[in-house]
Image: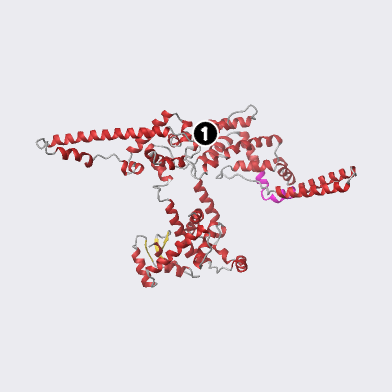
Amino acid sequence: MGDLYVNNRIDDKLYCKLCFEADMTKEHGMLSKVYSLGEKTSSGNFLAHAKAAHKESAIFLKEQSSKLTNWIQTVPKGSPATSQFDVNRDIVLWLCQDLLPFELIEKEGFQAFNKKNIHLNLPTSRALATTALADVYVGLKSKVKEQLADIDSDGAANMIRLSRLLGHERVTCVAHCVNNNLLITDTLTKIPEAQALISQCKDIVSALHFKAHLIEEFVLEQKEADIFAKIQDLQDEIDADSNDPIDEMDDAEDWQLGTKKSNQGSQTHKTLKTTVPTRWNSILNMIRSLVSMETEVTEILKRIGKPLLCLLPDDIKLLCNLVSFLEDFEKFTLIIIEVSPNLSAIPLIRARIKKICALAPRDPLLMKRVKERIVKNMDKRIPMSDLVRATAVFDPAVRDITMTKDESRELLQNLHEKLNSSRFSSTVFGVGDERTTTDGGSGGPSGGNGDHDGDVGGSAKRLRLELLAEAQEDAEAHSSSSILDQEIDAFLAVRTRDQGALDFWRTHSNTFPTLSAMARCYLSISPGSVPVECMFSSTGLLLNGKRSSLAPSRCNMISFIHDNAKLLYTT
């Protein structure tokens, strides 16, 4: 019955969808005139209102829902719109994916383009922002629910659950710990020479702020001077060798054309980068831009009267070494922003950091100090904690590198014991795996011996039943322990490196049912905050200076469609 109402997150009310579409599409529509009820109200009230106020029956509402369903089915097929209903939803999907304002379709330029090429009957921006946007949001939300149908809880809930069960500290973003804490806070800011060099780079970028046009003009001057110098050299060669001047001139012309083409093909727009505290690898980007534009930066600093900021040759050499060193750390971000990363990546990152920070005889003194400080603080920032070990044991490729078979067996047994004895046991292992020996377990012995022991006192009966129940529990626990040991032994015998942890358990969940349930808890913990960071980035692009008055509920729908639109293109 969700087609009857629109959910407003602001005041927690449900608004009649038919009233909403009729009134809010008007130029001066008011939400107060829309029929609304409490969020817990039965949908039958909306149906009665629809019949009374709008003379609409449930058949019409089903037709509207059918239109939306049919539109959702046409999106992955790439079929053209066959009705105005489909056109409006297609436009909303396009604008939300590209984070464009709905007023775009009313712009004079787009109207002229549509009139000349597309010939669509364009709706108003208000109609898109009210009815069509809500429909696309509802349709896409149903697709997301299908994807999440088999998921009990999200990574954050599992993280809290595991911290309560195993007493672990709160998990922080690995990319932030490596790039911001380990590299910057613990290393570069603690070495005076490195800090002074980075501060000088920041001063250069600040001095050249809004001076990009001077750099571009200098680059053009250099290119023109190089071309004229080459032409003059060729002319001198032609004058010196007059055996076949025509061929020489042809060669010169070919060279000029080739140079012009190659310059055009390799020309790139260069800009200086600045540091941003909340951006990973921002110091690397700043230093790399300065090193790649060394000649241009030096010349422009002299022209604007700040030659003291120019980098010395020794400084450039140190910056080049620092860029080469930091680029290896930049690659760690690729692991964190993987589609389904987990904490088992931490042992691999630690091993690579140790390899990168191995001292070489030719390392400058500054680089040696940087490497030493990183190795010294690595255990503080990205420790090999119990939670990391618990996650690594469920990744066969990482498990065999970080621990022995006996250590893996002991860790798996301990984790199973803790999870099985916790109050979340039924959630982790399912109802079928609960060890229950209540009425069903003791009913057989009591029922079978009731007639023979009728003359025994009540206390003796209860004692005998308790002994039977304890013996049965011990037998079941021993049997369960034997099954678990067999499952652990079979899992530890598996060797794989080409298959990721999630892919492994997706294909082996039936082979190792108990361990699979445990792995689902640990492997669902993300090592980074990349999805949240991406959401903030897209929302920042959405709520710009020209759309600062966008309603929170509408902003929520646009962001949701932008982040999940790809699900509509999958069958």
- Amino acid type, mark 1: Arg
Q: Is residue 317 left or right of residue 520?
A: right
Front residue of 224/315: it is: 224
Q: Which of the colour schemes (rainbow, by chain, secondary structure, one colour) is used?
A: secondary structure
Q: Position of residue 342 (x, y in %)?
A: 47, 40
Q: Is residue 112 left or right of residue 420?
A: right
Q: Is residue 233 left or right of residue 79?
A: right
- Compared with 31, 424 (above or below) is above
Classify 10 Å Cα crowding around label 1: few (below 14), some (14-19), many (20 and above). Answer: some
Q: Position of residue 283 (x, y in %)?
A: 60, 41
> Is residue 548 among what the camera can see?
no
Seen at 20% across and 33% down, the residue is 467
- The residue that mark 1 highlights is 350
* 160 in relation to 479, above or below: below
Q: Nearer the viewer, residue 56 or 571?
A: 571
Q: Is residue 280 magenta?
A: no
Q: What's drawn in magenta, residue-wise? A: 204-219
